[in-house]
Image: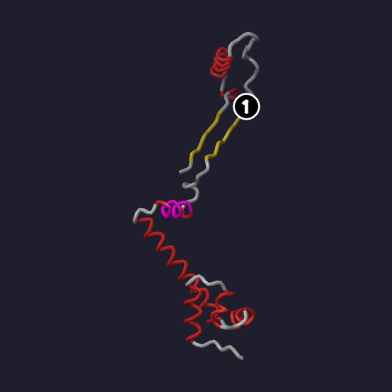
Amino acid sequence: MSFHVTKEILVKVEAHAAAGLTKKEIAAALGIHQATLFRKINENSEFSDAIKTGIAKGIATIANSLFVSAKKGNVTAQIFFLKNRSPDQWKDRQYVEETRRNVGLDSEIKIGMSAQEAADNYADTLRRGKGENVIQIKTHKRR
């Protein structure tokens, strides 16, 4: 049996692709082998374009539904939208950027000091230090 691309076939192919069917599923829906589908995609630009247009329409439909759902207060849709549309500003991760410089050994911590005394002594050393002796830690919380 020979498979010919007609206007009706192009409409069906576009509709199947818009509905999210894979190429394998489109071939099955048309009653053809997957190899025939790929051959027609390579031979016929209208056929190939119908699949591409259908895929784009399906994505647009779902994206619009997601956007409407997000606007209506669906928090999951809002989070998904923001994470995908603005990933640099909407991540769940917290990044810690740490720059360490040599603090030096001017801190006198002696045997017998309490933990609080040792911490205070070390903090005093850091406060007395100059710019090159300071430990800087920056924390970035991404929304």
- At x 48% / y 72%, what residue is drawn? 19
Residue type highlighted by circle 1? Arg
Q: What crowding class fits label 1: few (fewer than 14 Cα within 10 Å), some (14-19), or many (20 or more)?
A: few
> From what the image shows, is residue 123 above or below residue 101?
above
Is 12 magenta? The answer is: no
Residue projecting furthest to the top: 112
> From what the image shows, is residue 142 above or below residue 84?
above
How many labels sit on residues? 1
Q: Tell me the residue that label 1 is attached to.
A: 101
Is 79 magenta? The answer is: yes
- At x 55% / y 77%, what residue is drawn? 26
**Horizontal relation, residue 132 to residue 69: left or right:** right
In percent of width and height, residue 70 lies at: 38, 56
The quarter of the rendered structure image containing the N terminus is bottom right
In percent of width and height, residue 108 lies at: 63, 11
- At x 45% / y 44%, what residue is drawn? 143
In percent of width and height, residue 78 lies at: 41, 53
Front residue of this view, candidates 32 and 100: 32
Q: Which residues are magenta?
A: 76-83
- At x 38% / y 58%, what residue is drawn? 69
In percent of width and height, residue 20 lies at: 50, 70
Q: Quadrant of residue 121?
A: top right
Residue projecting furthest to the bottom: 1
> From what the image shows, is residue 50 above or below residue 78?
below
> From what the image shows, is residue 58 above or below residue 108?
below
Magenta residues, dominant SS class: helix
Identify the coloring.
secondary structure
Callout 1: SS: loop
Front residue of this view, candidates 111 and 41: 111
